[in-house]
Amino acid sequence: MEDKRLGVVGIVVEDLDAAAPINTVLHYYAELIVGRMGIPYRERGVSVISLIVDGENDLISAMTGKLGRIPHVTVKTALAKSRSDAP
């Protein structure tokens, strides 16, 4: 079993039609999500979603990969080092 990782996933949504597929993916991976905040940035015509995630790296990567394949969606991830990587 792989170590769990803690991290942040940033999602920029440039088309509100992407909301349904995004929510489908997030629902599927709900066990990874510790917290979620979504902010509509009306002046720029985008929405920004930030997720706090805690789970196996492979599952986090699978989730962000699926999100990144949705048109008009950009995803970036920052994960803390695993405990086994710590000195």
Image (cartoon, rainbow, N blue to C red):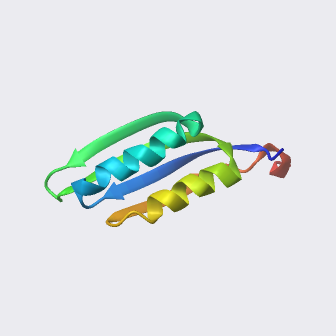
Q: Residue at x 46, y 57 (%)?
A: 67
Q: Residue at x 85, y 47 (%)?
A: 84
Q: Residue at x 47, y 39 (%)?
A: 27
User: Does residue 6 sit above or below 72 in this rendering?
Assistant: above
Q: Mark yes or no: residue 48 visible.
A: no
Image location of residue 29, percent across then percent down: 55, 42
User: Does residue 83 sit above or below 77 in this rendering?
Assistant: above
Q: How many marks?
A: 0
Residue 8 appears left or right of 19: right
Image location of residue 8, percent across then percent down: 53, 47
User: Can you name the residue that lies furthest to the left here?
Assistant: 43
Q: Mark yes or no: residue 40 visible.
A: yes
Between residues 70 and 34, which one lies in front from this camera angle? 70
Residue 75 appears left or right of 87: left
Image location of residue 1, percent across then percent down: 84, 44
Instruction: Name the quadrant containing residue 77.
Output: bottom right
Q: Residue at x 72, y 51 (%)?
A: 81
Image location of residue 18, percent across then percent down: 30, 56
Residue 3 appears left or right of 75: right
